[in-house]
Image (cartoon, rainbow, N blue to C red):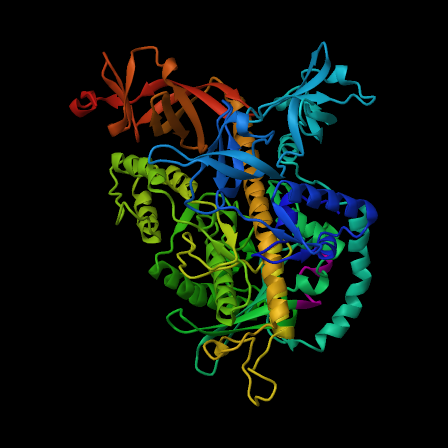
């Protein structure tokens, strides 16, 4: 099994000694060749002082001035090591101190100069933990020494020699190619690569999904071995169902509905969630959220599981989907009408105010009665059932979307929750997804109401893990930075809105709630919503519960409803199953009465360790090892999806070169101003050098450019007419030129700063 230095070092926690044999097993290096590679790595790490060896066992050596970080380089050669810890200083690394590390690599950095109030600390790369660029996009060049690859990403500050190996590289000169790195730079030897695919004569001639997949090194297929295992699962499922149904809570008599983008199972392979609804004797709502029990079908550490873990999360590139499991697995275990399905079910009791009274989590068996699409649900809510068979389902849907979900939403709004309004459905997850906030769609309001229910499921599961004090993975989203919002607030105020924050020291969800309520008062609502979305920080996973800004949770939330699409959800399922199967429901065996570990009724009644010590420690270690990887994969997916969106927009604007559009000035800098084209939500730059009619000076205090003679100002919120002058497709840069618009400068604008 292949492993990185980062993966190896993740096996060490605290100050514990770890035997070499344990490392072999955990890293899958029992075979002779992989075992030798592991030993070489251990010897090297010992030699440079990262590990120490005692009695044949290894211990990690920690130094206060050595930190783990990820390199971020600019095209001009400036590099910073970005630490994982929120708020930690970025460390400046000179090109001479990179030790052959590349942009994006995970590294250990030694701080060699402390920072000051105005200067970042300075460091040098001590060790490369994990390479971020096993392959890259490049153009082929020919020189006297042979062929070389020039990376398209100008943050990669090198060129690679190309191994011809029988290839006709002459035909690929100046073409866009995908290059696999065969050797990173060693001493005087330059990096070496091999062309694996010629994508086109240039970026515009290549397929956009090919560019994204190659740029981010995304796997587009599964090996035959994995496909064979998926097919083997087909034969195992009937026996598994027969065996498991006896041990689970039987919910097959409950009216059960799935709600998906499309109703046809062939077009939506992963149907993961189903819903039931009833009333308790006290008159409270009892909501059932049932998620396919992937953990029961896929064994931990099996080859299918290892593949899913490596991929981390499903990536959605418009019509192209890169799943964590083969499609066959989705077909086999997705929730299908008329069939018995193994699920992990969360039953939440909700009172008339929307408060959660209690909840329980149970392994169940269900049988889906109706599989509906979002659009079908919308239509049924509007006109009711057309036939007697659907009547009970329509009644349940009306209760779900007119009673229960609005109550849950009201609770979210009360604690400061907000919604980002978008025109089209973008998220492929039914919870908050990668955006980290609930999205409302003008043409599909049922979707945000559904999201509220699934987010509530993540909240109660997080509360349960916390209350039982068992290891878990939590989703956290830091608050946005004030400077990210500053231009947006100025823009809104220039448009006549009253946009203010409660405090400039701390941004709160309540602030965002008020902003989203103000935006519809102007014609620029869609642009403002889009810009607000871009100020949200990425969601990250942590072993400790924390706040989630977009959902206005301050004390813990997790993902649990998409175990077939996100590996973290599958891990949460496995943790719950371990608790239910091996957790201790009483302090000692002699105690007559125990607690129900499935239910919130046990909260506050446990004063013992629920899990045996060894299981607790093993879980903590496993989560410690994987969280960084999961965060990296989520960031990779986010970048890839944004990349494709950017390429689509660049392609669209390339076809509109020479056309004139109306847009809104959304950012002003000394070098020009950014214009958001209203109808297309595409941003371009009007460079100051293109303003030929006058000499324009930048006024930072008023966020505007002012003509010295004509006194025309281009400020935040001004409407302008712009012509599309040129488009750099690969870099997704759109250059615009003004045709009309702007405003007259005020006397304040003309004052020297």
Give coordinates of residue 172: x percent, y percent.
Answer: 73, 18
Whether residue 261 is visible to the viewer of this picture, yes or no, is no
Q: Residue at x 52, y 45 (%)?
A: 426
In which quadrant of the rendered image does the C terminus lie? top left
* Marker count (numbered): 0
Q: Nearer the viewer, residue 28 or 665?
A: 28
Q: In this view, does 60 lie above or below 166?
A: below
Whether residue 431 is visible to the viewer of this picture, yes or no, is yes
Side of 219 where 572 appears, left or right? left
Answer whether residue 445 is magenta in the image.
Answer: no
Q: Is residue 589 above or below residue 411?
A: below
In this view, the residue farthest toward the front is: 55
Answer whether residue 337 is magenta in the image.
Answer: yes
Give coordinates of residue 416: x percent, y percent.
Answer: 34, 56
Q: Is residue 325 above or below residue 145?
A: below
Give coordinates of residue 291: x percent, y percent.
Answer: 61, 64
Q: Which of 415 and 494 is in front in this view?
A: 415
In this view, the residue farthest toward the left is: 747
Q: Nearer the viewer, residue 24 or 615?
A: 24
Give coordinates of residue 375: x percent, y percent.
Answer: 54, 53
Side of 476 where 417 appears, left or right? left
Name the quadrant containing residue 588: bottom right
Q: Which of 577 and 324 is in front in this view?
A: 577
Q: Is residue 465 above or below residue 159?
A: below
Q: Give the range drawn in magenta.
A: 329-342
Q: Which residue is drawn at 46% across and 58% down?
A: 449
């Amino acid at each position: 099994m292949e492993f990185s230095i980062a993966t190896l070092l993740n096996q060490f926690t605290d100050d514990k000694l770890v035997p070499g044999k344990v490392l072999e097993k955990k890293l899958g290096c029992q075979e002779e060749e992989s075992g030798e590679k592991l030993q070489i790595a251990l010897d090297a790490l010992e030699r440079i002082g990262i590990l120490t060896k005692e009695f044949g066992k290894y211990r990690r050596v920690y130094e206060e001035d050595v930190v783990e970080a990820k390199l971020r380089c600019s095209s001009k050669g400036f590099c910073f090591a970005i630490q994982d810890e929120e708020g930690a200083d970025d460390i400046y690394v000179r090109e001479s101190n990179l030790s052959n590390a590349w942009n994006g690599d995970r590294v250990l950095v030694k701080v060699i100069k402390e920072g000051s109030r105005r200067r970042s600390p300075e460091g040098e790369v001590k060790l490369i933990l994990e390479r971020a660029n096993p392959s890259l996009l490049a153009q082929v060049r020919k020189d006297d020494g042979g062929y070389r690859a020039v990376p398209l990403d100008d943050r990669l500050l090198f060129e690679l020699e190309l191994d011809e190996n029988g290839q006709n590289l002459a035909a690929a000169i100046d073409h866009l190619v995908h290059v696999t790195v065969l050797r990173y730079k060693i001493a005087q030897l330059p990096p070496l690569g091999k062309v694996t695919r010629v994508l086109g004569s240039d970026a515009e001639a290549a397929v956009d999904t090919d560019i994204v997949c190659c740029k981010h090194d995304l796997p587009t297929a599964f090996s035959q071995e994995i496909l064979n295992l998926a097919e083997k699962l087909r034969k195992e499922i009937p026996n598994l169902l027969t065996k498991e149904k006896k041990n689970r809570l039987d919910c097959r008599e409950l009216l059960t509905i799935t709600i998906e983008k499309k109703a046809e199972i062939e077009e939506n392979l992963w149907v993961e969630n189903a819903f039931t609804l009833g009333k308790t004797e006290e008159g409270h709502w009892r909501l059932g959220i049932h998620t396919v029990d992937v953990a029961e079908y896929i064994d931990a550490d099996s080859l299918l599981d290892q593949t899913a873990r490596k991929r981390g999360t499903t990536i959605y590139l418009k019509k192209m989907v890169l799943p964590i499991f083969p499609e066959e697995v989705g077909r086999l275990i997705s929730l299908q009408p008329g069939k018995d399905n193994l699920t992990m079910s969360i039953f939440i009791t909700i009172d008339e105010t929307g408060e959660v009274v209690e909840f329980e989590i149970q392994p169940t068996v269900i049988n889906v009665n109706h599989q509906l699409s979002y659009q079908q649900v919308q239509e049924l809510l509007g006109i009711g059932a057309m036939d007697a068979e659907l009547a009970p389902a329509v009644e349940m849907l009306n209760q779900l979307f007119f009673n229960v979900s609005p109550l849950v939403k009201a609770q979210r709004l009360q604690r400061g929750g907000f919604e980002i309004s978008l025109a089209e459905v973008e998220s492929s997850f039914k919870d908050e997804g990668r955006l980290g906030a609930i999205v409302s769609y003008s043409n599909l309001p049922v979707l945000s109401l559904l999201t509220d229910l699934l987010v509530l499921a993540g909240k109660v599961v997080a509360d349960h893990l916390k209350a039982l004090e068992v290891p878990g993975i939590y989703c956290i989203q830091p608050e946005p930075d004030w400077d990210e919002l500053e231009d947006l607030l100025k823009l809104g105020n220039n448009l006549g809105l009253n946009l203010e924050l409660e405090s400039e020291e701390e941004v709160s969800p309540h602030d965002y709630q008020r902003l989203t309520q103000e935006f519809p008062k102007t014609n620029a609502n869609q642009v403002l919503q889009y810009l607000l979305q871009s100020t949200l920080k990425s969601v990250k996973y942590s072993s400790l519960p924390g706040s989630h800004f977009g959902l206005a949770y301050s004390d813990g939330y997790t993902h649990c409803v998409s175990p077939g699409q996100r590996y973290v959800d599958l891990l949460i399922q496995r943790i719950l199953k371990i608790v239910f199967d091996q957790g201790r429901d009483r302090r000692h065996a002699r105690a007559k009465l125990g607690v129900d570990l499935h239910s919130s009724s046990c909260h506050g009644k446990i004063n013992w360790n629920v899990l045996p010590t060894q299981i607790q420690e093993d879980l903590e270690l496993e989560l410690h090892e994987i969280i960084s990887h999961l965060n990296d994969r989520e960031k990779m997916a986010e970048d890839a999806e944004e990349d494709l969106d950017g390429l689509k927009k660049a392609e669209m604007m390339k076809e509109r070169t020479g056309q004139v559009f109306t847009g809104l000035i959304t950012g002003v800098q000394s070098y020009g101003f950014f214009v958001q084209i209203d109808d297309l939500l595409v941003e371009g730059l009007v460079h100051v050098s293109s303003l030929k009619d006058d000499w324009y000076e930048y006024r930072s205090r008023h966020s505007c450019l002012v003509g010295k003679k004509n006194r025309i100002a281009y400020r935040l919120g001004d409407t302008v007419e712009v012509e599309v002058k040129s488009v750099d497709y690969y870099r997704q840069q759109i250059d615009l030129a003004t045709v009309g618009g702007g405003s007259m400068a005020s006397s304040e604008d003309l004052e020297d700063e």
